[in-house]
Image (tube, coloured by chain):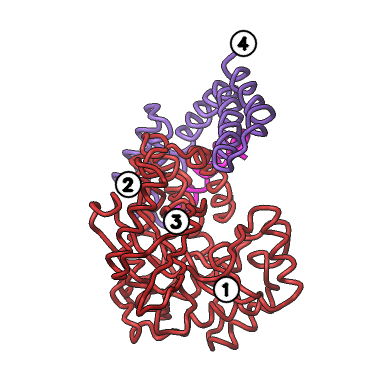
Amino acid sequence: MAPDELLARLSSTLRHDIGPAVVEPFPKTQAFMASVVLEKLSAQIRLASAHAEAEATDLVALAADLPPLLGTAPVPAAVAAATDRLAAGDGVPALSALVAALWAEREALGPERFEAVLARARITMRARIDRQMEYAA
Amino acid sequence: MTGGQPSDGVAVMEERIAAYLREQLEAPDLALSGVERIAVGWSHETWLFDATFTRNGVTRTEGYCLRRDPGNALLREMSDLGTQFRVLRCLEPTAVPAPRGYFFEDDPAILDAPFLVMEKVPGVCPSPWGRDGRRFYEEAAARGELPRAFTDALVTLHTLDWEAAGLGFLGVPEPGTGFALGEVAKWKRLIDATGVEPDPILVDLIGWLEANAPATDRRALVHGAYRTGNFLCHEDKVSALLDWETEVIGDPMYDVAYVLSDLNREGTELLSNLVERDEFISRYEAGTGIEIDMNACNYYQVLYGMRSAAFWMSASGLYADGRNTDLRLARTAWSIPVVLDRAARDLGY
């Protein structure tokens, strides 16, 4: 049995067989909460591979889109460093660093570049949270 | 349960509480009855009991509530029982409905952890998230008195002369953006304390909040979590405001935003499952003389997204690193994306 299927089955047992048989309120709540945790973990594991692949593709696309949006004007060092990290495949931490650098350097970037780059980064972030919502919601 | 229950059990805990109160109240015959640890909140342990003792030849029974800091609970880093006790003492002579604070002890030798003892105020505190609680507030809303009391208690809180009450010790934010930026910094500290790399959306959210902080000189005692489930109701009145864990001197719109938020109601248009929006706004404005600032409220509602993310990161971290075994905390790991999804929508994506 695949790990995600096993977790889903454990979740079902806790929800339908164990939880209802527990009398004390606190352990009963804990049994149902364990069921919820296992259910979400099961879905997260089931989707993990596809999500990781989609995320990697999105981050490569983002890294490719950034240079034209940043243009030829000087780019603040923190933004440039985060962009380089993204291009080097540094993943989500590089995306966080980019967003932090954009807000920190927004005056230096100017409103047009700031808005353009942030809007592009937000497309990647939206896709990422949509994927997470598939198992978290 | 790790840290949740005293290691030596409820009976021993009961005897230790009784021994402490015998000494404090100079009542060697004091006995406890109806001792229960109630399963409310995620921060401090809460124990309720009655104490019967003789004083001046008269036997009396008084209700008490004891809150103990297990040292491993949500908001551990942000909420201090000593501060809560001082707030309760400051509120005692005021019109704000709050339990009277009796004792605070920082010495772990007494009950293994800091604790405070306060008045057990009559009333019930149904959770608005459950079916029974929703029905309770629905019926109270239909009767009409509790919704008015809910608004009036907030009016009382926000019109309190907090300086005269001695609450300046909580810290007074700088004029302008001081309050908003102070709150952002506070919740950022909680996020940093988790040691977890913040999600890019959370980084974006914090950037937006820092760049768009509203300037205001409004100052009031702010509860920080003003909603049903955080106060006691008795005979359709607010008998006591509870959960003084996020209180702060700051913009009263912070509380108003929380009331107006749809985070605090389920399956109803009633604010906090209790009060009509228009009725709340008109009664609040008439009572306080403060015009509700919707722009500020909108900002604070976004800020609540950051606060929620900080809560859930902290909560799930407590479980993940083995400091707390309550599975409700483990569950919150999946609440973080839900909060961030909403935050992204608030920011327009």
Residue bounds of the magenta highlight:
A114-137
Q: Is B263 positioned to the left or the right of B306 in the image?
A: right
Dot in front, 2 or 3: 3
Q: Nearer the viewer, residue B88 or A112?
A: B88
Under mark 4, the amino acid is Met
Where is residue B172? Give x, y as percent: 32, 75
Residue count near mark 3 (Cα–Cα under 10 Å), binned few <14, some 14–19, many ≥20: some
Disc 1 sits on a residue from what chain?
B
Dot in front, 4 or 2: 4
Which residue in the structure is indicated by mark 3? B46
Evaluate if marks 4 and 2 touch, with contact meaning CB atoms under 8 Å apart: no
The residue lying at 67 percent from left, 27 percent from top is A17
**Magenta span contains residue A130:** yes
Tell me, for residue B193, which label it has, or none. 2
Which residue in the structure is indicated by mark 4? A1
Evaluate if marks 2 and 3 touch, with contact meaning CB atoms under 8 Å apart: no
- Separation of residues labelled 1 and 2 (CA atoms): 32 Å
Q: Quadrant of the N terminus of chain B?
A: top left
- Separation of residues labelled 4 and 2 (CA atoms): 39 Å
Which residue in the structure is indicated by mark 1? B294
Q: Magenta: predominant secondary structure element?
A: helix
Under mark 3, the amino acid is Thr
Disc 4 sits on a residue from what chain?
A
Q: Give the residue furthest to the top.
A: A1
Dot in front, 3 or 4: 3
Q: On screen, A101 above or below B25? A: above
Q: On screen, B122 above or below B79? A: below
Under mark 1, the amino acid is Met
Q: Which numbered disc, 3 or 1, marks the residue that appears first in the sequence?
A: 3
In the picture, which chain is purple?
A
Tell me, for residue B162, which label it has, or none. none
In the picture, which chain is red?
B
